[in-house]
Each structure stands twice: as C-alpha cells, then as structure tokens.
Image (cartoon, rainbow, N blue to C red):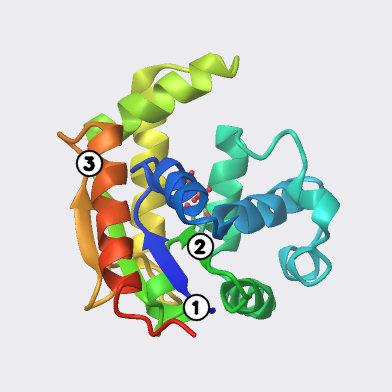
Amino acid sequence: MRFTVAIDGPAAAGKGTISRAVAAHFGFAHLDTGLLYRAVGARMLDGLDPVEAARTLSAGDLGRSDLRRPDVAQAASRVAAIPEVRAALVAFQRGFAGREGGAVLDGRDIGTVICPDAAVKLFVTASDLVRAGRRHRELVETGVETGFDEVLAEMRERDARDSARAEAPLRPAGDAVVIDTTELSIEAAVAAAIARVEAQLATVPRG
Ligand code: CDP
C-alpha cells in the first residue's frame, strides 16, 4: 500500500513530534525534510557551493551532529530559497513518499509541491511566541546557550524568508487540515492528526 501523509508548517510548530508519533502509530516511514536543507546549509557553512552540496548530499551528511544549531537553521533557510537546491532534492523526497507501507514527510512544501496528491495533508501551526518558547526550551536542553528573544528573532526571520520566497513558499495547501497547537497539548495535537489519518485510511480499499 502506498499512502503519503504530508505535514507542513512554520518553524517549531510541532511538525516533528506529530510526524514521528503518526509514523510510529501506523508503522509508516518518516522523513524530516528540514534535515535535507539543514545538511545543505551546514555544507555551505563548510565552504561548499550550495547547489553542489545539494546535488552530492549523502546519508552521512544527514547524520551530522550540528544540524540543529541556530546558525545551521538560518543557513538552511537561505539555501532553501535557491531553486536549483530545491530541484536537486525533489526526486529523493518523492521516492521516499511513494515507498510501500506508507510514509510521513514533514517540511514546508510537501502538500503543495512535493506530494500534491498526498492522501492526508496537515498544516501544523502555533503563535510565534509559543513556538519560540518551545524551540528555546529544546535548544537549552541540548546545551545551546541562547536567550528567548534571540530564538524568537531567528525564527521570525526564517519564517518571513520561507514565506516570501518565490520557489515553494511556506503556505498551507488548499486542501490541508490546519492544526493550531497554540493551546493544544502535544497529546491532543497528536490525537487530532491520528484521527485524520485514520479517517482517510478507512476509505482506502484493502487488498
Ligand atoms: O525544525 P524547524 O521547523 O525549525 O526547521 P526545519 O523543518 O528543520 O527546516 C529548516 C529550514 O529548511 C526551514 O526554515 C526552511 O527554509 C527549509 N525547508 C524547506 O524550505 N522546505 C522543506 N520541505 C523543509 C525545510
């Protein structure tokens, strides 16, 4: 069975947590597509040309320990605005989405560009203050020394760049279900996502 769940949304909205929980619940594979752009961004910071970095991306690049750093997030958002970088990453993402057994992909353009025919499309969002609070906590827990205001400013800059770019901008697909997690517990947000997938799966003929 091929069954794609597309989960998009701005930075730190809870896409990752929801995607992992949905994938674990249904036994689907999960791809965090932000990691692809973060790995290209990290390679650009190493001195590589970003288009070349995207074209030669390897599994090892995705396992780098520095991908969650705020400077790498900014670099990711800069390289993500380059059409040739995005083009170099399309085939891998579509291949992953089409695998047997179901797949969850999270990012910015999964429901709009990568998988416009996804069985389920979710757009996960929250107020920027709540998102910055969550990201600040995550970063501090992993040992990054940063302040709330700095995290908020970084996130706003990145969201603005991601939304304004000409190529595959951040926006909900017309047929996406919006989950606003500003006042939802993570359990409630995960339950809403699972219910949506469950309802759609029930319509798939079993053979
Ligand atoms: O974890 P967070 O939501 O902060 O970011 P991410 O999902 O790891 O994505 C990092 C950056 O990669 C984003 O700010 C986007 O610029 C870019 N990205 C993208 O353009 N398209 C995607 N499908 C995924 C990420």
Image point 25% across, 67% down: which residue? 199
State which quarter of the image contains the N terminus: bottom right
Q: What's under tag 1, amino acid-wise?
A: Ile
Residue 101 position, x and y percent, is 58, 70
Q: Write down the quadrant of residue 58 in the picture.
A: bottom right
Q: Mark 2 and mark 3: span between their CA atoms?
A: 19 Å
Mark 1 near ligand 1 (CB under 8 Å)?
yes
Q: Mark 2 and mark 1: span between their CA atoms?
A: 10 Å
Question: What residue does disc 3 label?
Answer: 181
Mark 2 near ligand 1 (CB under 8 Å)?
yes
State the residue in front, 51 or 182.
Answer: 182
Residue 12 position, x and y percent, is 39, 40
State the residue in front, 5 or 51.
Answer: 5
Residue 113 position, x and y percent, is 44, 80
N-terminal of the two: label 2 or label 1? 2
Dot 2 and dot 1 residues touching (CB under 8 Å) = yes
Q: What's under tag 2, amino acid-wise?
A: Leu
Q: Secondary structure at mark 1?
A: helix
Q: Write down the quadrant of residue 96 in the picture.
A: bottom right
Question: What residue does disc 1 label?
Answer: 114
Q: Nearer the viewer, mark 2 or mark 1?
A: 2
Instruction: Give the answer, above or below, for where 159 lies relative to 139.
Output: below
Instruction: Give the answer, above or below, for where 128 lies relative to 55.
Output: above
Left or right, residue 192 beside residue 84: left
**Which disc number belongs to residue 105?**
2
State the residue in front, 95 or 55.
Answer: 95
Instruction: Give the answer, above or below, for where 139 lies relative to 190.
Output: above
